[in-house]
Image: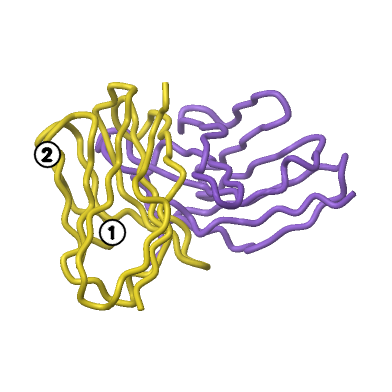
Amino acid sequence: NAGVTQTPKFRVLKTGQSMTLLCAQDMNHEYMYWYRQDPGMGLRLIHYSVGEGTTAKGEVPDGYNVSRLKKQNFLLGLESAAPSQTSVYFCASSYRGATYEQYFGPGTRLTVT
Amino acid sequence: DQQVKQNSPSLSVQEGRISILNCDYTNSMFDYFLWYKKYPAEGPTFLISISSIKDKNEDGRFTVFLNKSAKHLSLHIVPSQPGDSAVYFCAASAIKRDDKIIFGKGTRLHILP
């Protein structure tokens, strides 16, 4: 039982490059979330999904896209990376909505030069 | 516009004493509150939660107090232990919305020997 896993753990991109971050959970959770953590800014929600095939915008969605084609996977895409997207990205999942505990992955550290 | 505020970026407490972490919220729709703990290079983990129908919830050394009229909650850790050194995030949600939670910026707790 791996919980929530994230791929890759580290990545360095040049400005304008694209990439996809993969999040996988094996707990059969309905809800999945993508956050970014920046110094002094806490955890900010980028996008989230309340079930397979659904996505919704969070607090800071600009520059990111997501897809939830399978219940266990939630992908975060950067189409044209910018230095402002340098951050640590966390994926989380929960059984249902906001009153349920969210389980977080270990994070992906992304640097855009 | 910060809806969940943790006004103390850091806090130092002697081992064995009480740690008190504070959190304020502005949105009166919030009726469910959570605390998460985060160690460096790891994802956050759920610590304790409280519904607005209660004013106190206790789990071992951790107690959360909610003052709805003041829109204020606090996390008490008694006694503080070295392993409690971490960043603590306060989070809030609206049960009826049942989708996402809003995190504060976090408070870094240092337990001194």
Snapshot quadrant of residue B96: top left
For label 1, the residue is A59
For label 2, the residue is A54
Give the yellow chain's letter: A
Would residue A64 appear left or right of B39 to someone viewing this image? Answer: left
- The residue shown at (72%, 48%) is B85
Residue B64's place in the image compared with A82, above or below, is above
- The residue shown at (33%, 77%) is A83
Q: Which of marks 1 and 2 is nearer the N terminus?
A: 2
Name the amino acid type tagged 2. Thr
Q: Please name whichever residue, B36 or B91, is drawn nearer the observer in this view of the structure.
A: B36
- The residue shown at (42%, 27%) is A2
Across and down, in percent, residue A88 comes to 43, 59
Snapshot quadrant of residue B2: bottom left
Across and down, in percent, residue B80 comes to 80, 40
Say what secondary structure mark 2 lies in.
Answer: loop
